[in-house]
Image (cartoon, coloured by chain):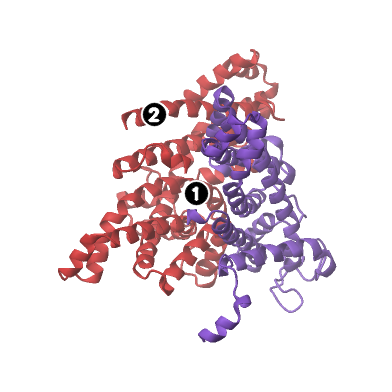
Chain colours: A purple, B red
Amino acid sequence: MSISSHSLPTMRLPQWATAPVMLGGFIVIAWAVIALTIHWWAPYDPTMLAGRRFSPPDATNWLGTDALGRDVFSRTLYGVRQSLPIALVVIVCSVTIGTTLGAIAGYVGGVFDEIIMRFVDVTLSFPPILLAMAVTASLGPGLENAAIAMVVVWWPIYARLMRAQVLAVREREHVEAAVASGAGPVRILLKHILPLCWSPIIVNATMDFGQIVLLTASLSFIGLGAVPPTPEWGQMISEGALQFYRWWIAAGPGMAILSIVLGFNFLGDGLRDILDPRSQ
Amino acid sequence: MATYIARRLIAMPLLLLGVITLAFLLSHFTNADPLTSIVGERQMHNETVVAAAKARWGLDQPLPKQYVIYVKNLLSGDFGTSFRTKQPVAQDLLKRLPATLELVIAAMLVGSITGITLGVVAANFRDRAADHFARLFALLGASIPVFWSGLILLYIFSVSLGWLPGPGRLDPRSEAPPFITGMNTIDALIAGDFAKFGDALAHLALPALALGWTVTGIVSRMVRGSMLDVLGQEYILAARAKGAGRLRVLLNHALRNAILPTLTILGFSFAYLITGAILTETIFSWPGIGSYAVEAARGLDQPAIIGVTIVGGAAFLLTNLVTDLAYLAVDPRVKLGSRKAA
């Protein structure tokens, strides 16, 4: 045994490639591929009649049909075209706004820091879903407004994270050296501090991807997000809730959300091990 | 330590003011007309009512003054009038509070019992099959959307097996027990009506299971960690050397010391329970504040949704404060102010 494993050193996977990371990466990539290619191979059009109403899963409709006779399996797969792009937009916007303000607050300090961080404190005082509901309801229902609401709720998390990072890195010796050699504040922040701040942001953003997918579905489930007949997971589960003795209507979107949340969690855990080995 | 507590206590009302300010901004810079949101559409033609509302909420005043009046009204418990129920929002919320409390307390019991059990099992069988299973079960609970796990539980235990009733708080043919706490299970017990107690408990079981499962993971991870810490200490070895049984050491010697830090996590899990209660109550037709919030959001009932948001924020702030102070009391070694940054 030891000889054969010794003779095949190239077959060994790198240390970070644990089962959860591989599984998480596989799930996320699979969903991304589905999102890009589903229109070529979906069994049915997600908004069209595909059989009798409420027919349970069988060979023609793998996950059965819903109240309007639409194919639940096709609708589930099409649903990723709502969830993933929205999560991507929300995460990118939140990270951009949050890290920019957090970095400036941490580096500049003073009044600017106070104002930003007190605003962050207040925003984080709310249960996220409740504030997102209130903002969406104020703006009016719809996926775009739900996305705006989620950015409002989520950016403070990154602002707080980034500020803490900048405060820690600012005290390091190489920054002092850069100051002594006459670098300007903007250059120091961009070239000497920020490059060392990204690891926890990337790990958190990866894990938050799943949380945003969940929050989007929750808002749609409540009726503030996607509008029918858009195939969206939360919306589909809320249709399934009206017919809870027909389990298959909610099963597809439920599994979809669960798999994507788990996938990003596994991936985020793995990324943490790669980017920051000390935090284990 | 005293300065830390003082700082937290001083920050509390300021944060609360921030919460109210954000709510004010939300209700004044949106499509909704604040006047309609106070008097309701049907009363908009009634000039005396409109004038009275304008005076009470200072809507003819400049914005800063409106803000001051808004804060004053909120502090005196006036959240405006709901569009849908035509009742004062504060009154609606009070009426629905007991149902939510009953559900959240039950879910917290479910979450802590399952979490502590799994945590102890996982620590005892570290890195073996039972450990992995316990962690998977906890991870599933934290990842599954509660509005789907609720449906699954309903399908299994109510539709397929018929062991437990469907949505609602009580059998529709029976009346609520005499109002004392507003929590049906407790009120039925106080009234000595055990049949009704059983009915209320059966209705409570599924939503509490679905909601409790979401926090199982938070609790079990904490218990597992602190159990492993404690099990490595010398007094455990001493107890074992003196001949104490394995189970006795585990429960009497280890768990008793491992449980203290876990108690504080319950406050932390409150955030998850609020979030979950909104969705769980909707699935189970549970007439609490969560389903009230959803009805308000669906009906674009601005004053109601803002009212729930403020109350939710305040409750959230308060539990966070209590949790942090409890943490201090339980574990004097904790470094002050460092936990928030983590």
Q: Chain ID for label 2?
A: B
Q: Which mark is residue B272?
A: 1
**Location of residue A41 (image quadrant):** bottom right
User: Which amino acid type is shown beneath numbered disc 1?
Assistant: Tyr
Displayed quadrant of residue B309:
top right
- Amino acid at dot 2: Leu
Instruction: Identify which residue is drawn at 56% across, 65% down.
Output: B152
Residue under pointer 2 = B9
Q: Does dot 2 land on a helix, a strand or a loop? A: helix
The vertical placement of A116 against B208, above or below, is above
Q: Residue furthest left?
A: B242
Determine which of the numbered discs, if any, sits on residue B155 in the image. Answer: none
The quadrant of the picture occupied by the N terminus of chain B is top left
Quarter occupied by residue B148: bottom right
Q: Earlier in the sequence, mark 1 or mark 2?
A: 2
Rendering coords of residue A23 (x, y %): 61, 68
